[in-house]
Amino acid sequence: MFFFNLSIKLILIEMSTKPTIIITGGAGFIGSHTCIELANDFELIVIDNLYNSSQQSIDKVQKLINQKIIFYQEDLLNLNKIDSIFEKHQPEAVIHFAGLKAVGESIQKPLFYYQNNLNSTLSLLEVMKKYQCYNLIFSSSATVYGSQQSPLREDMDIGQGVTNPYGQTKFMIEIILKDVCISDSRWRIISLRYFNPVGAHPSGLIGENPNDIPNNLMPFILKVAINNNTSVHLGDQFNQLKIFGSDYSTQDGTCERDFIHVVDLAKGHLAALQKIDQLSGYHVFNLGTGKPISVLEMVKTFERVNQVLVPYQLSDRRPGDLEVCFCDPQHTKDILKWETEKRLEDMCLDAWKFQKLNPRGF
Ligand code: NAD
Ligand code: UFG
């Protein structure tokens, strides 16, 4: 309806009235990279409360795309304000990235996570319905598969063995989205289940910029690499990386994950938007490479391609970690005609470029 018919699309582009898309959480890590991939085809409206991001990421994306983004620093929980944004812009589609995502914090503050992630999604759906915007892409996560054996496929059960409130919100939202689609055939909703997004835009201008001490592997490697290979010192906690567990039943004893370059991931959203009018109802797709990479292999590759040292210590297992987690990407390839292009080396090179240019974040 909005993307699909090529001739209509070309006419629209000639008249420079591109379809409008609302991107919630568009100032964040994945949202900002996705804005870049969508800029040619869409008028971009970003709603973000900047809880875990900064205005600078919007400024930098605008610079990269040489195009204006309409930005609202708003909380999705503010229903009246969100309503007025929809009334004004009448979007054709929404990509819903906004959410809290720190697994550990979600265990400490479950109500905060349920309140933010669930209520913001419910409000968004209400407003979308009111303004008859029925096309939605949602950021889900591999976490919904629980502890099932990899490779993980979209037709597997979800929700069993999800160990933290963050993961529960993803599972619950998927259930809500499915029910919403059953209730009214005008809805077209796609949940994209991300595996482990890493890397940065090759320009080095934007990348992962967490406001707190990172829990995830790549942001931690980056800070350890800054401490040990540059004149910047980010604090003693980043002198050394702890590798959580070296006695797993994997090739080198460390956990294995499906790391995906954030630019590939961002392109997956464009692929989903290009397909959404041909699908009706609720659909899910994995976004991953399908190739397991061990934690140690990631560290070694990072050191090799960037010619840096990342001192590490083998430590105890981290509670709740899965031994191995990777996807079967075939369904996504078949239907969305999307697959990853970037290598592990690119993930390490681009992430380091961003970190060197922004050693203290932005
Ligand atoms: P991020 O924290 O960088 O981006 C999320 C953005 O949402 C932030 O800019 C934050 O300020 C904003 N936000 C949060 N609550 C909001 C609210 N109530 N109103 C308005 N804005 C709000 O995270 P990301 O890594 O870009 O992740 C994007 C989405 O993908 C999230 O939903 C996350 O759960 C999901 N996801 C991420 C990963 C990952 O490893 N990065 C993996 C699987 C799924
Ligand atoms: N790791 C370390 N040291 C660190 C940080 C991580 O060894 O300092 C290890 C972890 O133990 C794990 C691997 O690196 O084995 C990856 O850990 P991350 O925290 O980067 O990622 P996870 O796979 O644990 O979690 C990610 C997302 C979650 C999502 C989950 C779904 O961060 O949001 O994938 O599979 F729920």
Image (spheres, helix red, strand yellow):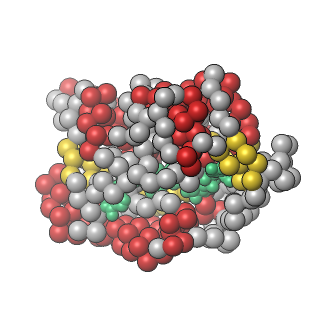
**Which is more toward the observer, 133 or 193?**
193
Q: Quadrant of residue 127?
A: bottom left
Q: Is residue 232 visible?
A: yes
Q: Position of residue 113 (x, y in %)?
A: 44, 70
Q: Residue at x 76, y 58 (%)?
A: 316
Depth order, front residue of 308/75:
308
Residue depicted at x 55% and y 46%: 236
- Residue 272 vs 63, above or below: the answer is below
Looking at the image, residue 111 lies above or below residue 69: below
Report whether 252 appears left or right of 212: right
Q: Is residue 254 above or below residue 105?
A: above
Image height of 24 relative to 2, above or below: below
Residue sticking out furthest to the bottom: 111
For the C terminus, the image quarter is top left
Q: Is residue 112 found left or right of 236 in the rendered image?
A: left
Residue 154 x %, y %: 63, 56
Total of numbered circles in the picture? 0
Is residue 335 rendered to the left or right of residue 83? right
Left or right? Give the position of 347 relative to 42: right
Q: Quadrant of residue 209?
A: top left
Residue 215 x %, y %: 56, 54
Residue 210: image location, x then y, percent: 44, 49
Splitting the image into four quadrants, where does ligand 1 fall?
A: bottom left
Seen at 23% across and 68% down, the residue is: 78
- Work out whether residue 332 can be spotted: no
